């Protein structure tokens, strides 16, 4: 398990959620 890769995926997920929230508002 690569920590950096996991972090990147987590970050992308967070960013996607933020983007989605922004579009919804």
Image (cartoon, rainbow, N blue to C red):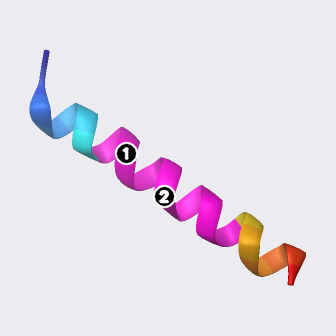
Mark seen at residue 19: none
Q: Position of residue 1 (x, y in %)?
A: 13, 15
Q: Residue at x 51, y 48 (%)?
A: 13
**Residue occupying the point 63% across, 59% down:** 17
Marks 2 and 1: in contact by CB < 8 Å?
yes
Q: Which residue is mark 1?
A: 10
3D distance between C-alphas at marks 1 and 2? 6 Å
Image quadrant in which you'd find residue 18: bottom right
Residue extent of the magenta highlight: 8-19
On residue 14, the disc is 2
Instruction: Say whether residue 5 is left or right of residue 10.
Output: left
Give the dominant element type of the magenta stretch: helix, strand or loop: helix
Left or right: 24 as drawn, with respect to 12 = right
* SS at badge 1: helix
Secondary structure type for disc 2: helix
11 in relation to 21, above or below = above
Which quadrant of the rendered structure holds the C terminus? bottom right
Question: Quick check: 14 left or right of 2?
Answer: right
Crowd class of label 2 (few under 14; some 14 to 19; many from 20; radius 10 Å): few
Question: Which x, y percent locates residue 15?
Answer: 52, 63
Give the farthest residue toward the right: 24
Relative to 6, does residue 1 appear above or below in the rendering?
above
Crowd rating for badge 1 (residues with CA inside 10 Å; few <14, some 14–19, many 20+): few
Q: Residue 21, how many percent across, how many down? A: 74, 72
- The residue located at (14%, 39%) in the rendering is 4
Does 10 appear in magenta? yes
Name the outermost residue toward the bottom.
25
């Amino acid at each position: 398990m690569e920590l950096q890769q996991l972090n990147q995926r987590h970050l992308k997920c967070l960013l996607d959620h933020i983007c989605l929230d922004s579009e919804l508002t």
